[in-house]
Amino acid sequence: MAKNPPSNPLPPDTIARHNQDHQHVLDEDYQALSRALMRRGVDLAAVEKKLAPFSLALPSWGLGTGGTRFGRFPIAGTPTTIHEKLADAAVVQQLGRLTPRVSLHFPWDRVEDPVALRQEVHDLGLGFDAVNSNTFQDQPGQAHSYRHGSLSAVSAEVRQQAVAHNIDCIRLGEKLDSKALTVWIGDGSNFPGQHSLGDALDRYLDSARKIYAALPDGWRMFIEHKFYEPAFYATVIGDWGTSYLAASSLGAKAQCLVDLGHHAQGTNIEQIVARLGRFGKLGGFHFNDSKYGDDDLDAGAINPHQLFLVFNELVECELAAPGSFDPAYMIDQSHNLTDPIESLLSSAETIAGAYARALIVDRAALAEFRAHDDVMGAFRVLRRAYETDVGPLLARLRVGAGGAADPIALYRQLGWRAAKAKERKPSGPGAGIV
Ligand code: RM4
Ligand code: MN
Ligand code: MN
């Protein structure tokens, strides 16, 4: 493969030629969509303007081959270092143009020189998003074990160590130009009686306050809830109510983060989004999909309609607080079988597509039907937007920003992974997410 500057890991002239070959069809499809929407009173150019700034962060841990606790089957050329992961993130961004930032997870992504890493990511045309702490695993040489919890542990030494790690993540994040810390803990109990359910939350809040106090100006702290796993009886931050309580008692810089896979089956996630948005505590998202639990499948792969309904609420939040509603959007998936670059390209497009569909909802008609308790009328407004193929709009924005008309087809044609398989050291089969 020819050498390109890092910010263009793939040859731009090949992308330009690929786009020329597609241009005619892209234009035709865009015009057809524009005319169809015009008949419905929707101005596609206005939608395009709103959609254009939309972006998502990539999780560093989603760039490598994922795995389950039973095994891992890495593809040849999978990245094994943060530098290789960043190079792959640059490929995703060059082709898809929706993912200009990477979210790091510590200590998985720890490097000797964070300032050099910041330079590296800038050279790749990317930036860093929220930093994530990890007190759900023990690390070699660690003084105290997280076996019995971290921020909510009974042991004061363990809590202190977990707080110090989070503060360390903030300090690293400052050097990396991050502006947020995401805290997800695995704390909880596996047996009734193991913990005092009340005291465990008190201890968590006490620890979280110490982390909060270390946040620099302009930073946010995202509290991510999850209803089970690894704690199988009671998780300390297990639902949005507890997350909201924690975020409210900490202060304005603390907000709730909704990971789509962290709810019981049947939970109305879009309603949680509406509630948190209304209370000004919706900090961000981890997009993925699930059928059973925290499956970490590709966003929209199982329930694209739910994804659309989530974005429908996000658009309502935006309209209710114009200019000040600013959730952090990130993908949080585990790619066990697919090439992560392909999954991330596909998921980013799916997520942006859900947003585009929510933007073309005829809100005036919806309000009218609601005002008259016209159930079917209101439902049909949403359904019509959901059933609209917004692919031509996404392709136009992507190509306009320098991305590829058909990102996955071009990625395959360019043979990036096969070239990396020759350069990169093989990744072991060990179980686990990274
Ligand atoms: C958790 C949660 C966190 C992520 C870890 C790896 O289930 O989703 O966001 O950091 O997995
Ligand atoms: Mn998550
Ligand atoms: Mn998760």
Image (cartoon, rainbow, N blue to C red):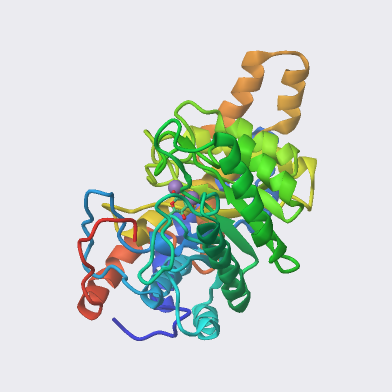
Out of 179 and 317, give the one closest to the viewer.
179
Q: Position of residue 373 (x, y in %)?
A: 72, 13
Above or below 68: residue 388: above
Q: Position of residue 45 (x, y in %)?
A: 67, 51
Picture quarter containing residue 141?
Answer: bottom left
Picture quarter containing residue 219?
Answer: bottom right
Q: Is residue 35 visible?
A: no
Numbered circles on residues, count: 0
Above or below 338: residue 3: below
Above or below 4: residue 141: above
Residue at 48 percent across and 40 percent down: it is 262
Residue at 78 percent across and 52 percent down: it is 324
Q: Is residue 79 left or right of residue 281?
A: left
Q: Is residue 279 visible?
A: yes
Q: Is residue 63 left or right of residue 181?
A: left
Q: Position of residue 81 (x, y in %)?
A: 35, 74
Out of 269 and 434, give the one closest to the viewer.
434
Q: Position of residue 346 (x, y in %)?
A: 41, 52
Q: Quadrant of the C terminus?
A: bottom left
Q: Quadrant of the N terminus?
A: bottom left
Q: Is residue 75 left or right of residue 302?
A: left
Q: Is residue 292 left or right of residue 172?
A: left
